[in-house]
Amino acid sequence: MDWKKIGKKLLFPPIWLMVILVIISAAALAFVFVKGMEQSIPAYIVYVLAFYTLSVVTVFCVMVLPKQYSTIKQKIYDNPLGNRYMTDRVFRTNISLSISFVISMLYVGINLWSWRMLQSCWFMVLAVYYVIMAVMRFLLVRYVRIQKIGTNILSEWKRSRICAYILLLINLSLSGAVLMILYQSKGYDYPGIMIYVMALYTFYSTIHAIVDIVKYHKLGSPVMSTAKIVSLSGALVSMLNLETAMFAQFGADMSMENQRSFIILTGAGVSITVVTLSAILIVNANKEIRRIKDGE
């Protein structure tokens, strides 16, 4: 028996197998923690599987991925669609906005269904919020598809100003959501392992939105900058939703007063951020629109 060959196969499994291992390990760990089975025999089996998965993924990232990076990158650029996505920021923003619009509408459907099944006004508030987000993204997607970015700056500033006013309207919905949490103890309780998936998505979307705001601001396109501000606003509200869900699922040992204090601070921070971003957009849009019209 060739132990060296066996060891190599164990340390360097196929990528498809690593993906399956990651999914199974994450789901199994979440199940163990949610069910309170940390000290059981099945839990120790899950721990071993998770350790093995982490080991092979680490080996892949450190030893295999750097060697294949240039090859993978070249294959992406050789593909016409992949090349356009990597090199055309406008096209990439269009794709991102379209996906965000679909996700917003999906959230609207989920919250309307939850409101109907659970009879909780909290879900109706969330549905209203995601409807407004969907309207904004629809306006931006429609503009990007009809008008080429950078060809009509005046029109872009006008569209940006409209979205800024809508962001202010969203803040009213957000304030209603915070009041609902504080006075009726309503929260978004994600079932099963969904809370871990949503936590990962929330942190990713927040970091990604902040990086994109800085990156796309340099292009001087009001529509593209506004699109990223809309994404950041959505990510911040998702952070607030996640916080309430974490309290609902894991906050049994924390007093209600402390939970409310955290929610007040987070809600106020998100609300102030959204209002500030909206105000900056409106002020800049009005100033630039006047400047362009005076120049004409």
Image (tube, rainbow, N blue to C red):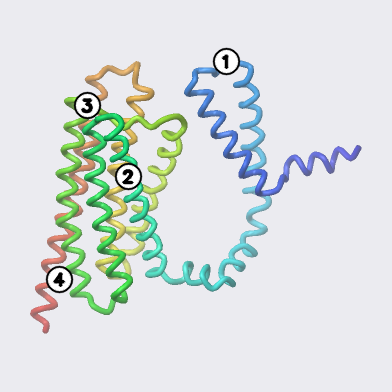
Q: Work out whether mark 2 precedes mark 3 in sequence or the reverse, and give the earlier one.
A: 2
User: SS class of the residue under badge 3?
Assistant: helix
Distance from disc 1 to disc 2, alpha carbons, whole Å, reads 39 Å
**Residue highlighted by disc 1:** 39
* Separation (CA) of disc 4 from disc 1: 63 Å
Q: Quadrant of residue 148?
A: bottom left
Sooner in the amino-acid sequence: mark 4 or mark 1: 1
Residue 288 numbered tag = 4
Of label 1 and label 2, which has the lower sequence position?
1
Task: Tell me the residue at 27%/47% (across/down).
Answer: 130
For the residue labelled by badge 2, is the local secondary structure a helix, a strand or a loop?
helix
Residue 5, relative to residue 51: is it above or below? Answer: below
Q: Secondary structure at mark 1?
A: loop
Q: Residue furthest right?
A: 1
Q: CA distance from mark 2 to mark 4?
A: 38 Å
Work out whether mark 3 precedes mark 4 in sequence or the reverse, and give the earlier one. Answer: 3
User: Is the residue marked by circle 2 packed among few (<14), some (14-19), or many (20+) residues within 10 Å?
Assistant: some
Q: Which residue is denoted by mark 3 in the rendering?
A: 261
What residue is drawn where x is 75% and y is 40%?
10
- Say if mark 3 contacts mark 4, CB within 8 Å: no
Q: Is residue 25 left or right of residue 140?
A: right
Does dot 4 land on a helix, a strand or a loop?
helix
Q: Which residue is denoted by mark 2 in the rendering?
A: 109
* Whether label 4 touches label 1, CB < 8 Å: no
Q: Are marks 3 and 1 in contact (CB under 8 Å)?
A: no
- Amino acid identity at mark 3: Ser
Q: In the picture, residue 56 is in which quadrant?
A: top right
